[in-house]
Structure formats: C-alpha cells, structure tokens
Image (tube, helix red, strand yellow):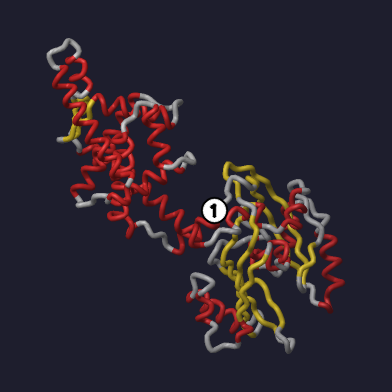
Amino acid sequence: MQLTRLTTGVVRFRIILALALALAAPLAGGATAQGLFSPAILVNDRVISTFDLQQRERFLQLLDAASASEQQARTQLVEETVKLAEARRLGISPDAEAIEEGMAEFAARGDLSTDQFMELLAQNGIEPETFERFVRAGIAWRQVVRARFADRAAPSETEIDRAIAGAGAGAGTNLRVLLSEIILPAPPEGAARAEQQAARIARITSFAEFSEAARALSASRSAEAGGRLDWQEITRYPPQIRSALLSLAPGEVTDPIPIRNGIALLQLRAVEETAYEAPEYAEIDYAAYMIPGGRTEAALAEARRVRTRVDRCDDLYGVNRDQPADRLRRESMAPTQVPRDIALELAKLDAGEISTALTRTDAAGNPVLMLLMLCSRTPEAVLDTSREDVANQLRNRRIEALADGYLQQLLANARIVEP
C-alpha cells in the first residue's frame, strides 16, 4: 500500500540520515548538518526543526509560490503541532486508511494520483513525511472539531429561514421607498363611483391632501395614519408596481391600480439609497385563512385569537384542524403571479407577520375575512437550493467559527519558544 511505501521510505531516510550525520560529525560541515536538524521552535514539549521549516516552505512554494514564506511555514507548523497535541489529549488518532484517503483526495485536486504527487514532491526536494504530516494534522483536527462542536452547530429552523431570506443580498437593489396608500372599496355596484374618486386622487401632488383623502376614503388599516406606510425595500413589490413607483417624483401618485373589489393608489413620499442591497425574489410563499363574517366584530375577534396561536404558517394547519379544508390556502408562486391586493399587503409584512386588511366572498356569496400570513420570500439566489443545503452551509460556517476560536485559545495557552 502507498502508506506502507511512504512509511518505509521515511524510515530508510531517517536511518541513512543518522548514519550520514554520525560519519560527518568530525568534519567541518558537521555543524551545518546539526544546525539543520536543531530545534527552531519548541511548542510545549514538541520540537520543530530548521529542516521541518525548510521542508514546509518548499511544500508551500510548490502549492502556491506567490504566497509561500518562512513565516507562513512557521505559523502552519506551530498550529499543526498544537492541533495534533489536542487530538492526542482527546484520544483521537487518524487511522492509516483515513490518511491514505486524505492524501489521495489532496493529490486529486491537481488531477494527480498519490504516486504522481509523491513523485512531484521528490522532484522538488520534499520528503514524503512533510506531506503525510500535513494531511494527518488536517484529518485529526477535523475529527477533534466534530467531536467538540457537532452538537452545538445545528442551526434552528428560524436561522435557516433567516439565511434563505437574506440570500442574494448584494445582487439586487439598494432602493427603499416611503409610501402612502389609499385602498378604495369598489364592489360591482359602486365601481363607477370608486373609479371617479381614484381619478381625482391620482392627480394629487400634496402630501397633506393625500393624507386627508386616505383618512376619509381608504379602507386600509393605514387610513388612521393618513395612509402612511413605513420604509420598504422596493423589491418587496411585484415588478408591475415597482416600475410604476420608479416613474414617480415625491408627491406624485400612481395611476389607479385595480385590485379585487377595490382600487389602490400609492403616493411616493421619498426614495432612499442604502448600503444594503435587497435580493430579487423568485418565489413568495404565503397562507390565507378564511374567517366567515367579513369585517364583523366576531370575525375580527376570531382573527385576533388565531394571531395569538401562530408564529409560522405551518401553525395554521393546527388552527384549521376539524374545519373545512378550503378555509386554509397555502400558495407558493412567482411575485408576478400573486394577486395585486395580496401582493400589496405582503409587501408590508416580514415572515410570520399577519394582515387582516382583505376580505373575500365564499361560494355562497357570503363575506369572509382573509387572515393573510407571509411564510417566506425565496431569493433568486437560492431558488434551486434545498433547506438541507442551507442548513449544512450554516452548520459548516458555525463549526468553522467555533474551531477558529478553539484554536486561538489553544495557541494562547501553549508554551511556544523559538531558541
């Protein structure tokens, strides 16, 4: 086996080296040879020789000539010595098979077999032991880190949701908009009157006048605040509404936007460019729980009761247990496919938040209150990435951070002497 040949070669090398040093001792060059194998660094009770440093520097030059240096070789060898000592303390020792696999995997990164890589090392004056130590330390440290931190690194469902929501940031837009809204009821019997009102509102350019109209006419919950909404990333709005907003100057109002049984009008109050670039969203996941009664006090009370019982969309399945299945709808679709009135409400929500601003009618024509909950927004950057992949990425990043802190603590506690 390759490892057997490697070990045999190392042993043979050490025997020949010892004989050479013994024979050369009386000669003038003996001091140079002894200096080459004298301690260069002491890490606790372990010795790093000048020969070790030279070998590691050659190895680094072979891998990446641009960044190789004596200091980098020193840093790596000190860290590896500390890592291997901690592995021994914990009773961890990589077996021969693991080391062989690690060597083969490393060589394969350069499209080489282990034998081919060993030949390349020999051509550059690098002993097999240098490569074997490098691989052994890496494997041992990974086993140490897994043993200590695997149980602590698992991300929660909330952390996975947050990572998915934030993926792709920096690849979207950094515009936020400050809007006011008016939602005019427009049932079939009152559609003509609503259209006339909307035409007048669309010509408004005064913030105060728009707020007055919102308080008098809007069916939205924001009416009490004069229709004023909080800052929102523009990517939360569907593309057709986003393009309308970008064409406005502050004070101007969109053309009337038809929605189900209503008309929406948005006034731009301000635009802000921020350092944070919100991602473009490829999919919106939301749930709609239908409560009989429309905007009656009994229906609104039921909505408040449901709100206290749910934190996530999945909780609504428990709320709907023993109820007709069609009372709960769960939809995942592209932003362009979301109905406009729902899209406008979802734009105001973060994942897990609820709106009760909308109503519908059931099959018999009776009014129902829509309890609308945003489940998640999926950025384009992770559309084809599974939750498991995201969880693994989070877990690996957390383990890496914990391992870095652990290593720095071990280095701080180690006795490191350079004679």
Q: Is residue 113 left or right of residue 350?
A: left
Give the mark count: 1
Please rate how many residues cluster around mark 1, counting C-alpha atoms within 10 Å: few if below 14, some from 14 to 19, many from 20: some
Residue 78 locus on image (x, y percent)? 26, 34
Q: Residue at x 33, y 42 (%)?
A: 135
Residue 3's place in the image compared with 331, above or below, is above
Q: Which residue is mark 1?
A: 166
Q: Secondary structure at mark 1?
A: helix
Residue 120's place in the image compared with 169, above or below, is above
Q: Nearer the viewer, residue 166 or 107?
A: 107
Could you tell me the amino acid type at mark 1? Gly
Q: Quadrant of residue 266?
A: bottom right
Q: Residue at x 71, y 86 (%)?
A: 366
Q: Is residue 406 left or right of residue 120?
A: left
Q: Nearer the viewer, residue 174 or 221?
A: 174
Q: Residue at x 52, y 81 (%)?
A: 319
Residue 307 locus on image (x, y percent)? 52, 74
Q: Residue at x 70, y 78 (%)?
A: 360
Check the image and name the residue furthest to the top. 28
Q: Nearer the viewer, residue 297 or 305?
A: 305
